[in-house]
Amino acid sequence: MRQLAAAREIHHGGITDTRTHAFDGSSRIVYTNSSPDTLREVFFHLYFNAFQPNSEMDMRSRTIADPDPRVQDRILKLKPEEQGRLTVNSLLQEGIPTRLEHRGTVLKVFLSSPILPRSTATFDLDFTGQVPKQIRRSGRDNAEGISYSMTQWYPKLAEYDHHGWHATPYVGREFHGVWGDFDVKLTLDSSFTIAATGVLQNPTQIGHGYGVKDNSVAAANGQLTWHFVAENVHDFAWSADPDYVHEQLQMPDGPLLHVFFQPSGAESVNNWHQLAAYMAKSFAFMSEHFGKYPWPQYSFAQGGDGGMEYPMLTLITGKRGLGSLVGVSVHESVHSWYYGALASNEGKYAWMDEGFTEYASSEAMRHLFGGVGDPHLDGYKGYFDLVKSGNDEPLSVHADHFLTNHAYGTSAYTKGEMFLHQLSTVIGDKTVHTGMLDLWNACAFKHPEPIDVKRVMEKRSGIELDWYFDEWINTTRTLDYTVSGIERTKDSVRVTLKRLGDQLMPVDVEVLFDDSSKAMVHVPLSLMLGEKANGSEAYSFTTVAPWTWTHFTYSFNVAVPKKRRVLSVAIDPTKRMADIARENDRLELPEGEKAINRE
Ligand SMILES: [Zn+2]
């Protein structure tokens, strides 16, 4: 979580030719090394170089068992004028040239003098590039006709932290960046409207829906220079189109929301008109429950190839029904919390980025559209299917290195949400929610890691969670508990549970009586060295003695009220445990039978 590097970045770029899609730019980066280490080299990402035949991204897409249908062999087929390119022509360190090595999507810079611990260096870069035809996320002329989706477009400083450098070659998956302040000027043909990370500094010069244009300021050579400033972010993205309709909504106690779309069809236009009002509700909900949105603006722009999050900006495809448009916008904007401010290394911990976003957006969507039942349970089936397929891999695998897109996708999104929701059976649902606010307070504007989540959840609950984080993150062991017996004693029943799987969990048990009343019992795990507090769940429960983790069976007594008969005993009545064999979770007592014992 420690932040060992920071940058102040000034970029000036622009599309120099909207026919060839060539662009150039310059950057001045004031880089602070807060680490205890002396740096002799630095790395930059050059993402656009992925969009060239035989790049790592191309080859990976053509050899993986289940390629992303948006990529497949499309990179291989790009003609030279459709390919992506990004070249750093020179990089001066305090005015002195450095030696540069272009290695595909990574630039290695041999510094002219080492950067000492807790010191600062100034880099001046000069770069040229070509915007690729849209394949994934960035590029020109996306499927819906948006001219420029300019994401990961500039030489982007790689992050250095207590793990070392994170100069990961790009294969089309996750990102990670250095915290910084961005001052960006973009020069473009004046017909284009730009949506971007950051706050526009010259709205009266620009107009385009940002403010009332001062017509005494004329565009030079038919071009406009847009000046954006973004503080406390780790990336800067933008999109541009001459047909964008631009609408704004100022939230009373929140950011200014921008919406940019290309009008096509009455229904689509009507949906986009409604988007800002829905998003204001979502932002208010998120700010109340997961931490106050910290930036002054947020933009929803049509672009890209699905939905992708950037600081203060998302690019989403727009030809959707209202539910889908709002759904993708909620998900991407919730990334402002899990990615934007809680900036986990997405490559290493994609499940913290996508999974926690899924967790919070499930709740935001229920807030917007209502609905009964637990909104987090939908994804469990995806996990069970992955386990059945035999392709499951540990969450700790780096996002780029999952063997299938299936395992990567399910791990990042489904298992990530499940990890957090299942934790509520251990420490209580309300405790998880308070813990998520603790995580915000402890880690916003840092790079949280699993250990930071563990620490805040342990502190909030008073429960030891090493076993939960170790086993669920680093292994693919599965969970299977069963009710193996019910035995009648004088005025109670003795319930015996059995662990069949390798994965350990405390167990919630529901005893159902013949008058439909229920007794809820919580069986803690010995490794917890504590137990979830009554009041931490929506229902009340009785806690029995801990189940010693080395023991495969566990028995406890439940008092049976007078003249009542036990109908059934079930584990995990709320279905929050990822138990892969739910058919053995409930033991019914046949009519007339007073005791049963399967042993
Ligand atoms: Zn996402």
Image (tube, rainbow, N blue to C red):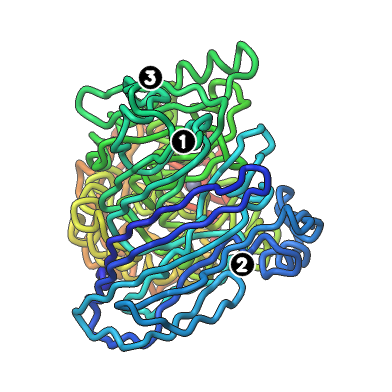
Mark 1 to mark 3 CA distance (whole Å): 21 Å
Q: Nearer the viewer, mark 2 or mark 3?
A: 3
- Position of 53 with respect to 449 (left or right) is right
Circle 1 is placed at which residue position?
A: 194
Residue 509 in sight in this render: no
Instruction: Judge the density around disc 1: few (<14), some (14-19), many (≥20) Cα neighbours within 10 Å.
Output: many
* Quarter of the view holding residue 164: bottom left
In what element is the residue under mark 1? strand
Q: Quadrant of residue 464?
A: bottom left
Horizontal side of residue 92 vs 582, given as left or right: left
The residue carrying pointer 3 sits among few (fewer than 14), some (14 to 19) or many (20 or more) residues within 10 Å by Cα, namely some
Check mark 3 vs ligand 1: CB closer than 8 Å? yes or no. Answer: no
Q: Residues within 10 Å of mark 2 (few under 14, many from 20)?
A: many
Q: Would you say 147 lies left or right of 185 here?
A: right
Ranked by sequence position, the earlier of labels 2 and 3 is 3
Quadrant of the image occupied by residue 226:
top left
Residue 277's label in the rendered image is 3
Q: Nearer the viewer, residue 407 or 567?
A: 407
> Mark 1: which amino acid?
Ile
Q: Which residue is mark 2?
A: 402
